[in-house]
Image: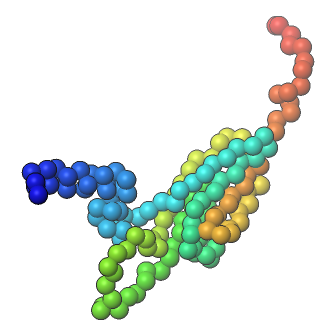
Amino acid sequence: MNNKNLPVRSFNDLMDNIFNHGLNGFLGSDFIQSQPPVNFKESENSYHIEFAVPGFTKEEINIQLDNNVLTVKGEKSVENASSDTKYKRREFSFNSFTKSMTLPEDVILSSITASQSNGLLQVDIAKQINNENKIARSIEIS
């Protein structure tokens, strides 16, 4: 067996792990606060935002709106495993998270609704439809 490429392969595996799984894979999942993946969709009349929050109940999620910034926080109590319990492999844990995003200027802030089902938090926001801009008119030159 030729081991001359072993250190390079190990380094490459380490770098692949960091780039593919972030620092969670390198430093351990408890070290870094994670953020849920988000889908942000736009239709003619509204915006629809989906947050992947599997394992969280609606009581563990808080949604705040401050100065046109939507912030979603998930808080889950840390699992208290007995001292003799050791993971052989741990690919997920229920860490707390915070995700903030600035909403577009054309949202109707009072229209925000949220629901949760099957690990997805769904936030819907109506858009302002300014019909005044769509009316054809003559413009006088002064």
> Count of labels shown?
0
Q: Examine the image and state in which quarter residue 54 appears.
A: bottom right
Q: Viewed as shown, does residue 93 lie left or right of 65? A: left
> Is the image coloured rainbow, by chain, by secondary structure, or in one colour?
rainbow
Q: Viewed as shown, does residue 46 lie left or right of 62? A: right
Q: How far across and down, in percent of the image, does residue 87 sit?
A: 33, 81
Give the residue displayed 37% in from the left and 57% down from the top.
Answer: 21
- In the image, residue 107 sits, relative to residue 141, either above or below, namely below
Q: How far across and down, in percent of the image, does residue 75 sit?
A: 51, 73
- In the image, residue 98 sits, relative to residue 68, either above or below, namely below
Q: Viewed as shown, does residue 141 lie left or right of 70? A: right
Q: Examine the image and state in which quarter residue 82 appears.
A: bottom left
Q: Determine the residue located farthest toward the front in the rendered image.
A: 1
> 69 or 142, which is in the foreground?
69
Q: Determine the residue located farthest toward the top in the rendered image.
A: 141
Give the residue displayed 82% in from the left and 7% down from the top.
Answer: 142
Q: How far across and down, in percent of the image, does residue 39 sit?
A: 61, 51
Give the residue displayed 31% in from the left and 68% down from the top.
Answer: 28
Is there any visible trace of residue 108 in the rendered image? no
Is there any visible trace of residue 72 in the rendered image? yes
Q: Quadrant of the N terminus?
A: bottom left
> 73 or 116, which is in the foreground?
116
Q: How far across and down, in percent of the image, does residue 133 sit?
A: 82, 28
Give the residue displayed 23% in from the left and 50% down from the top.
Answer: 12
